[in-house]
Image (spheres, coloured by chain):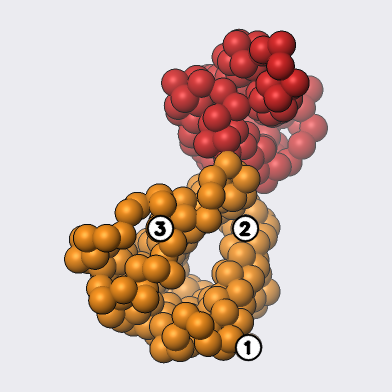
Amino acid sequence: MICEKKGGGAFAVLSILAASLFFVLMILAIADAPGWVFGEDLIEALAASDSGVYLRSGIAISGILLAFGSIGMIFNGGRPGRTAEGVLLMISGILLVWVAFFENDDPIHDAALILVFMTFVLALIASAYDDFAENRSMMFGSLTVLLLVASIGAYAAYGPAMYQVVWIVAAVIWVMARGVKGLCEPTIYKRK
Amino acid sequence: MTVRPKIVKAGFGFGILGGLIAGIAALMAFAPETAATANMWLGFLVVVLFFALGGMFKTEGSVSWGVVVFMAALATGVTVAVTMFEAMDIWFGIILTVIGVIEIVIAANSMTGRWIKTDRLLG
């Protein structure tokens, strides 16, 4: 017997909060840093500046919220793609906290950043697999594919300063859309 | 024989339109210099994707619903990427991106899905 229940909204709200807080704090850091030029200076330069405390706080808080928000995806009644997505995003969230707490010149910072990137991309792929399997969530799956391809294009087209921003904006959009999707989706529990 | 829903016909129409516009954009990117060859190649990639997408909305199409939506998203994403790469004029890129988003909405529509999964087979 399968019992369908609308739930898991709290976890979805955490995801939305993670994306929103990070974006707001990043905008705050950019506005507070007069010497930082959009599209010319790297995000690392912003993080190392006096205004970097806002950005690093945003990274740390959003990482924690993302990790907690992904818990709801792991226990979902037998969807391997969604479970993988949840686990990968949880790891990504935890690693974001490391990125925030370790200094830019620390090897742990660089390693954590690379792992965040890898786990996040793998989470996107797992999410796309889950969405297209059994035609579950076509719009969200197509958004995932569109953002992935556009991000690859940005890497080919722009320098590091610009494509970093494109990647960050794409990630924020995806996490927010995922949160909204989680609010609309019922949580399915299987009873034996 | 079942009739194709209007939204599916619109999907075909927008696919062909997107392919034609992308073709014009690719030809306008032509220049005698070697470097422009890459721009034309990228433009024609967009042409191929849109024409293929349009064809998937035909009765003779053989792919699943998920593949149609994936292709619509891929065509739109590649259009955005090619525009960022400045391989086509930005206004063509914006128009094609709008057409691509319309195609995603059409492809993801439940009526389109029902037609692809069942009615197309009956036709």
Give the SS element for disc 3: loop
Circle 1 residues within 10 Å: few <14, some 14–19, many ≥20: few
Q: CA distance from mark 1 to mark 2?
A: 29 Å
Circle 3 residues within 10 Å: few <14, some 14–19, many ≥20: some
Q: Is residue B73 left or right of residue A13?
A: right
The amino acid sitting under disc 1 is Lys
Residue matched to label 1 = A192
Residue matched to label 2 = A128
Q: Is residue A13 left or right of residue A175?
A: left
Q: Is residue A41 visible?
A: yes
Residues tagged 3 and 2 counted as in contact (Cβ below 8 A): no
Judge by depth and name the residue closer to the eye, A84 or A46. A46
Q: Is residue A23 left or right of residue A118?
A: left
Give the SS element for disc 2: helix
The disc numbered 2 marks a residue on which chain?
A: A
The amino acid sitting under disc 3 is Asp
Q: Which shade of the palette goes to chain B?
A: red
Circle 2 residues within 10 Å: few <14, some 14–19, many ≥20: many
Q: Is residue A30 left or right of residue A113?
A: left
Judge by depth and name the residue closer to the eye, B101 or A164. A164
Residues tagged 1 and 3 counted as in contact (Cβ below 8 A): no
Residue drawn at point x = 70 percent, y = 25 percent: B35
